[in-house]
Image: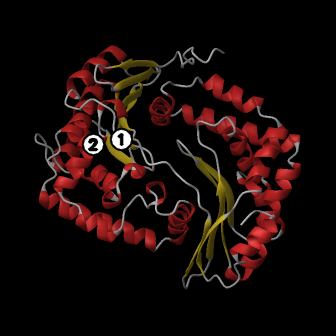
Amino acid sequence: MNATMPLPSDARVRVTTLDGGLRVASEAMPHLATAAVGVWIGTGARHERLDEHGLSHLLEHMAFKGTRRRSARAIAEAIEAVGGELNAETSVEYTAYGTRLLGEDVPLALDILADILTESVFDAAELAREKGVILQEIGAVEDAPDDLVTDVFLETAFPDQPIGRRILGTPKTVRGFDREAITAFLAREYRAPQVVVSAVGAVDHERLVADVARLFAALPGGAAPPAAPARFAGGEARLERDLEQAHLVIGFPGCSYHQREQYAVQVFGNLLGGGMSSRLFQEVREERGLAYAVDAFHWPFADTGIFGISAGTDPQDLAALVPVALDCLMEAAAGATDEEVARAKAQMKVSLLTALESPGNRAEQIARQILAFNRVIPREEIVGRIDAITTEEVRRAGGALAASSPVVAAIGPLAGLPSLDAIRRHLGSPR
């Protein structure tokens, strides 16, 4: 394909770009009576400055706490009066606000979503209450070691960088935010070219575009500043805690979602630890009984990625689990079979296609693809990319992981955890 030609988009999805740069996307599903409608903003935790740590998440919370036209209670009552439910999510690279309701009530959903994103008042009393809620949320993560170890893992992989900071922020940063900090972040980051309104189900595209153009006209144009580039560092973090289990993540630098190799890495992760037939599950749990839960994952971002093996185990089994898990990684890299690769690819395709049968998941995928690739990738293209992956490519992807410098994060009684140098020696990886 000529590089100067635009890449094909999904013909089932209609996309309109408004004058300010906001994209409106929809996929009609005539057999549905309901619709999933949401607003996705291409800004998240990694777009925060050091003194803004946790602000994206706070802003997401505050969006529901009152506007110039509606109180917090009125917002909830308006959407629930038609059977809908508002939800929101903050991630590393985007923030989302959405709802699921009857198709005939899509205009109401858009009115409420536009109201909370362009007319929120950030009342001081509401802000104080919501900061208290978030402080409790931070405390809940501290009390959940399986969640906390993931935060520590990213902090260690990407130290002193926005991409590695905890999405919730810290008690100190959260307490320090005021209305001026929120409005400044909103003005800088919530700009029309960073926004996608996505709707799937019982939707009419022309009506959707007209309503969005009118309701979101207040969003400023012009691009938001780019996120700081990521730099994988590796290293380790050990948090000794008096717990029943030791929680562990061992990771390696992965791929960006712009890299073709990410598909091979995803397949490798699936055959290594993605299901009951995976190598980690069979060897660590079924054969040796060293962990109840063990898996492998790959998280791609715009300019980097992270691959990991996670497990929770009895502290007495920690010394045995680590080398067994590393051996599974290296053996899969050296000798993944055609049958394993075929099974992993089949699992990926079914997972993908099953997710797309949900209007909410489909609306999210459409929005995220537009933000990431400036187009909606046809599902046939994604399936074709998965089908085209060879066993040799999967082995090569695994070999690159095993040869890279690891990052280790662990929480619990950790006397049995091998040192980082021992893990490196076992892998034969560089320091």
Residue 361 higher or lower than 31, as above or below: below
SS label for mark 1: loop
State whether residue 152 is above or below residue 397: below
Q: Measuring from the top left, give residue 265's x and y in whole percent.
A: 70, 45
Residue at the far front in the pictured view: 431
- The numbered dot on residue 225 is 1
Q: Visible in this render: residue 5?
A: yes
Q: Which amino acid does label 1 sit on?
A: Pro
Cα distance, mark 2 to mark 1? 8 Å
Q: Residue at x 17, y 44 (%)?
A: 120
Q: Position of residue 368 (x, y in %)?
A: 47, 35
State the residue at coordinates (63%, 14%): 2
Q: Name the residue under label 2.
A: 188
Query: Which of disc 1 and disc 2 is earlier in sequence?
Result: 2
Quadrant position of the C terminus in the picture: bottom right
Label 2 close to label 1 by CB (< 8 Å): yes
- The crowd level at tag 2 (other Cα within 10 Å; few <14, some 14-19, many 20+) is few
Q: In this view, does 323 lie above or below 372?
A: below
Picture coordinates of residue 236 (x, y %)?
A: 61, 71
Question: Does residue 195 show up?
Answer: no
Type of amino acid under label 2: Arg
Front residue of 426/76: it is: 426
In the visual, does 281 lie left or right of 377?
right
Task: Kindly identify which numbered label has been placed on residue 127.
Answer: none
Q: Quadrant of residue 240?
A: bottom right
Asked which quadrant contains residue 353, the reply is top right
